[in-house]
Image (cartoon, rainbow, N blue to C red):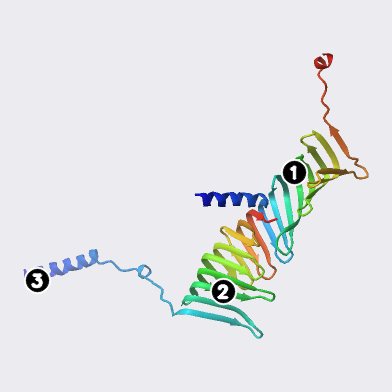
Amino acid sequence: MKKTLLIALFSILTLANDLKIVSDEYEGDNKKGISIFSGNVKATLKRDKLNADKITIYTNKSNKPTKLIAKGSVEFFVQTEDGSKYEGSAKKAIYLPQEKIYNFFDDVKITQLDDKKEIIGQEVKVDLLNSTAQAKSSKDKPVVMIFEVEEKNSTKSAQ
Amino acid sequence: MAINIFFISIASILVAIFVLFKPIKLSQMNSKEFSLIDSTNMKIYKIDESSLKSTLYAKDAHQFKDRIEFEDVEYIKNMKDNKEYLDSKYATYKENIITLTQNVLFKTDDGVKFKTAKAIIEEKSDTLKSDGKFTLSKDGSYVNGVKLIYNSKTKKVKAKNIKGIYKL
């Protein structure tokens, strides 16, 4: 009984650090180390979630993922090391597992859930290790940042 | 009177034959197929002008008119840059197509492993197909799904209904 529980616990702990991916279709090229998942693709990595029409995974010689490229209707939820939570959408996303950096491209809408900040831009970088988010604009589309300001209650302010 | 009894008894026998005896249809006859050659612990080597292409080992083999059936099969295929290994409980070889059933395990030198219940190898096109559930793994990462097509030459895989786990 104890052994079974230990095995189950070990499996849960090891799976928690894995990249899980579900899709309708799959194409793999073992020579090049490329795996293409398409059709309702849902990827989960620790607490992060990435949904897209197509996700391409590039692997090294030991079959470890080095880069993920998500394309199509990209929707995401990511959490940095300090616990900041971001969710949003884009047309393209690149994740580098070793650096733990997400880059979102084209019509990016990202909301920082805790601070209720919304960023709209053409390129947004979320660094999970340093817990930072940077936005870049394009020539004709500037970065837009929306803050939700809490209005003070008039009765409270009167007191 | 005696003549009447004779004719009546002949007529009765004829009626009984007509009613009780039925012709046997040839297609209904038991057509159990017998093997032409049976062998145990056999090895088949496939060699071209320059090298050994493949080795097939089987605990039991039975050759029929149109096919060869194997039991406890190990198949090794020598590719240009690596080797491929196939194990299964049963296999049938017919017109350049090998059908493997029960505990099918496919391995390559570069660490790719593939498990399924039934697989078909088309020698001409160098493809391995499996319609049912399969697990494809390499270095701890794996992909589960159905309808797998693997090309040995290009090392490309196609499949459907995928659930994959990658070790980071």
Indicate which disc residue B75 carries. 2
Q: Position of residue B16 (x, y in %)?
A: 20, 65
Residue bearing mark 1: A78
**A81 sits left or right of A23 in the view:** right
- Label 1 marks a residue whose chain is A
Amino acid type, label 3: Ile
Q: Which structural element holds mark 1? A: strand
- Label 2 marks a residue whose chain is B
Q: Quadrant of residue A116?
A: top right
Q: CA distance from mark 2 to mark 3?
A: 79 Å
Amino acid type, label 2: Tyr
Q: Position of residue B121 (x, y in %)?
A: 59, 69
Is residue B79 visible in this depiction of the protein?
A: yes
Is residue B95 visible in this depiction of the protein?
A: no
Q: Which structural element holds mark 2? A: strand
Mark 2, residues whose alpha carbon is within 10 Å: few (<14), some, or many (≥20)? some
Residue bearing mark 3: B3
Q: Position of residue B26 (x, y in %)?
A: 36, 70
Q: Nearer the viewer, mark 2 or mark 3?
A: 2
Q: Which structural element holds mark 3? A: helix
Q: Residue at x 49, y 80 (%)?
A: B42
Q: Residue at x 82, y 21 (%)?
A: A152
Q: Position of residue A45 (x, y in %)?
A: 70, 49
Pick the front one: A158 or A19: A158
Cβ atoms under marks 3 and 1 closer than 8 Å: no
Classify the position of the N terminus of chain B by image quarter. Answer: bottom left
**A71 sits left or right of B165 in the view:** right
Amino acid type, label 1: Val
Label count reads 3
Mark 1, residues whose alpha carbon is within 10 Å: few (<14), some, or many (≥20)? many
Q: Nearer the viewer, mark 3 or mark 1?
A: 1
Vertical placement of residue A111 versus A36, above or below: above
